[in-house]
Amino acid sequence: MTQDDLKRQVAEAALKYVVEDAIVGVGSGSTVFMFIEFLSKIKNKIEGAVAASEASAERLKKHGIRVVDLNSVSELPVYVDGADEITEYLHMIKGGGGALTREKIVAAVAKTFVCICDSSKLVPVLGKFPLPLEVVPMARSHVGREMLRRKAQPVLRENFKTDNGNLILDCHGLTILDPAALEAELNNIAGVVTNGLFARRSADVLLLGSPDGVKTYKKKI
Ligand code: 5RP
């Protein structure tokens, strides 16, 4: 089975979490793009979708799914999104596609966060995947120095601007033993809009694609 087969498997499995006659939150990335394809098959059963990136909004519209502004939504029962790394505690690193800020906002509104990814994303400790920080452009050097002080190597994502007009610093070399504490600490650096740690609002359900089929993990309380 290829990695794409595993992604397709979980993208399809996520359909069972979609609530009829409601708005669904849709994240971003290649696994989510596959989810959008499956979602289009049941588009008449949902009210529409909130998108966590311009690319996902475009893709949803292309598939004839109504895209709704988050501000006009009072309830979002489910949010489906991928991850770059995830632990069995369902803490994640996200932002490989640079959509971390909007993803975090939509996740904050949703009642249930369903994470979909292939088994390569499940790790014992977060940090091998470089942690993305969305940074206001004038704060780039300041935030870079702050990260060096924390023993990380920040690398500016070349030729990339987020949907919010900001930069991404990918921070290498971190071993993240307390993701919730680091998430709060990094958000306190002036100029950081968001960091890619999703530990304070982790996923509630993980659908993990493996050659043996889809494995379901629930948040450990
Ligand atoms: C984008 C994300 C994506 O969810 C993450 O990068 C996973 O993407 P893919 O499904 O392509 O592996 O956080 O900002």
Image (spheres, grey):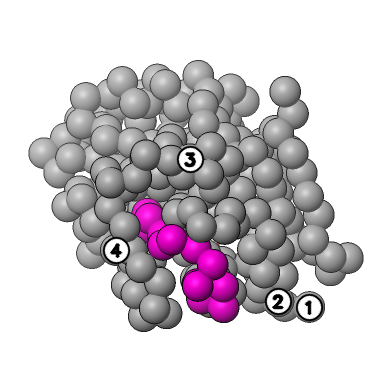
Residue type, mark 3 in image:
Ala
* Real-space Cα separation, disc 3 to disc 2, in angstroms: 27 Å
Q: Residue at x 71, y 76 (%)?
A: 5
* Real-space Cα separation, disc 2 to disc 4, in angstroms: 25 Å
Does the rendering let one see residue 153?
no
Tag 3 and tag 2, C-beta contact below 8 Å:
no
Reading the image, the residue beneath label 2 is 5
Q: Nearer the viewer, residue 144 or 132?
A: 132
Reading the image, the residue beneath label 4 is 54
Q: Could you say which quadrant of the image residue 126 lies in?
A: top right
Q: How many marks?
A: 4
Residue type, mark 1 in image:
Met
Region of the chain picked out in magenta, as a range: 40-53
Report whether 194 appears left or right of 173.
left
Q: Residues within 10 Å of mark 2 (few under 14, many from 20)?
A: some
Residue type, mark 4 in image:
Glu
Tag 3's secondary structure? Answer: strand
Q: Quadrant of the C terminus?
A: top right
Reading the image, the residue beneath label 1 is 1
* Real-space Cα separation, disc 1 to disc 2, in angstroms: 6 Å
Reading the image, the residue beneath label 3 is 110
Tag 1's secondary structure? Answer: loop
| Image spot of residue 154 (x, y percent) | 35, 42
| Image spot of residue 92 (x, y percent) | 57, 41
Tag 1 and tag 2, C-beta contact below 8 Å:
yes
